[in-house]
Image: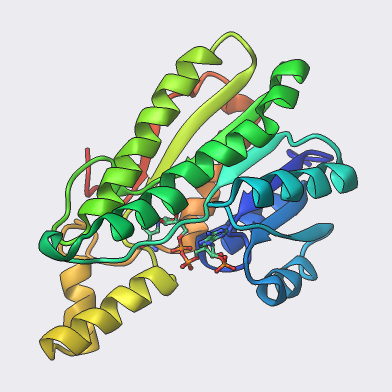
């Protein structure tokens, strides 16, 4: 098994893209710890993984992150692969983007990954082996209207990814960002509902609007993001570091 015995931590692994990553990496033989705030969702998901551990964690809270990683390491040993997937996207016009909203988007999408990397990087360096994969977004590579705070945070994640990749280049640890386009999860469903409520358009029209920039004219499936993450975890991807891999039907190139 490609990831046999490896300990993978996936933040936000209870649903959406994170759950698809958990399935894919579990099928490749990894021991999976999924972290998030909603224990019920996590526990239900963890039961489907062989083996899987659910650990409560709010990635915006440093103490919570510290305790969560201690619990994960106590169960499955040092973290071999960290997938920073937890995130939130709330759209607002810029004139309504107050400081609290900006701070929230930065906390969950940028500070969260920073805290989780800090919590497990030293052990990767000690072992001279590790993979850090940040689930960013095409919003790390280009701008979109009405999501300035989210886009700023995701651009920040990509800056962190590139700089950390250079710092760790000779230490056996790769750091990459996976950048999905609009993907068929709660985030996209919420955006579709928002468009329907605010504009009176139908759901099909809302989906067409969300996918207008995707040359394949469709939502990305979570499993497609998971397949890219699995590839980045493979031995064959050892020289891939500091990259932003768009999984977006050709939206950015
Ligand atoms: P979902 O809304 O389906 O899931 C978000 C996950 O993040 C949940 O498991 C949630 O768990 C977790 N989470 C949110 N806030 C926190 C927090 N403070 N602490 C810990 N966990 C948290 O989103 P997706 O699966 O769609 O998104 C996953 C990632 O992919 C995000 O980073 C998102 O920005 C990115 N992405 C998504 C795209 C899309 O169109 N769907 C496109 C591009 C990027 P819980 O609520 O239990 O805490």
Q: Please state the horizontal and vertical placement of residue 229, each as a whole percent of the image.
A: 54, 44
- Vertically, is 169 above or below 68? above
In the rendered image, the residue lying farthest to the front is 99
* Residue 6 visible to an observer of this rendering: yes
As rendered, which of 34 and 183 lies closer to the eye? 34
Horizontally, residue 87 falls left or right of residue 149, namely: right
Residue found at the far top of this picture: 170
Tell me which residue sits at (11%, 62%) in the image. 95
Q: Position of residue 41 (x, y in %)?
A: 66, 75
The quadrant of the image that shows the C terminus is top left
How many labels, in total? Answer: 0
Q: Where 180 falls versus 232 (above or below)?
A: below
Report the coloring of the rendering: rainbow
Position of 27 relative to 156 (above/below): below
Query: Residue 131 is drawn in which quadrant?
Result: top right
Query: What x and y, as percent, mark residue 234?
Result: 63, 33
156 or 107: which is nearer to us? 107
Q: Does residue 249 appear anywhere in the picture?
A: no
Q: Is residue 136 above or below residue 132?
A: below
Residue depicted at 75% across the width and 25% down the height: 123
- Provide residue 140's location: percent of width, then percent of height: 30, 42
What residue is rendered at 69% in x and 57% in y?
A: 34
């Amino acid at each position: 098994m490609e990831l046999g015995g490896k300990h993978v931590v996936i933040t936000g692994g209870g649903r959406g893209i994170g759950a698809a990553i958990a399935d894919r990496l579990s099928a490749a033989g990894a021991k999976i710890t999924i972290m998030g705030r909603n224990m019920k969702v996590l526990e239900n998901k963890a039961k489907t993984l062989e083996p899987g551990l659910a650990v409560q964690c709010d990635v915006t809270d440093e103490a919570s992150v510290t305790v969560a990683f201690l619990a994960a390491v106590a169960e499955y040993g040092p973290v071999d692969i960290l997938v920073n997937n937890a995130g939130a996207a709330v759209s607002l016009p810029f004139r309504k983007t107050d400081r609290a909203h900006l701070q929230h988007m930065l906390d969950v999408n940028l500070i969260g990954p920073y805290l989780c990397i800090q919590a497990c990087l030293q052990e990767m360096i000690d072992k001279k082996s590790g993979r850090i994969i940040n689930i960013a977004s095409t919003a790390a590579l280009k701008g979109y209207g009405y999501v300035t705070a989210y886009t700023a945070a995701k651009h920040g994640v990509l800056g962190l990814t590139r700089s950390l990749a250079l710092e760790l280049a000779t230490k056996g640890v790769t750091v990459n960002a996976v950048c999905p386009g609009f993907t068929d999860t709660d985030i996209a469903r919420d955006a579709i509902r928002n468009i329907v409520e605010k504009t009176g358009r139908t759901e099909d029209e809302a989906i067409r609007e969300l996918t207008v920039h995707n040359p394949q004219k469709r939502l990305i499936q979570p499993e497609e993001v998971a397949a890219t993450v699995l590839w980045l975890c493979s031995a064959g991807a050892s020289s891939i570091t500091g990259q932003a891999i768009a999984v977006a039907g050709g939206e950015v190139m």
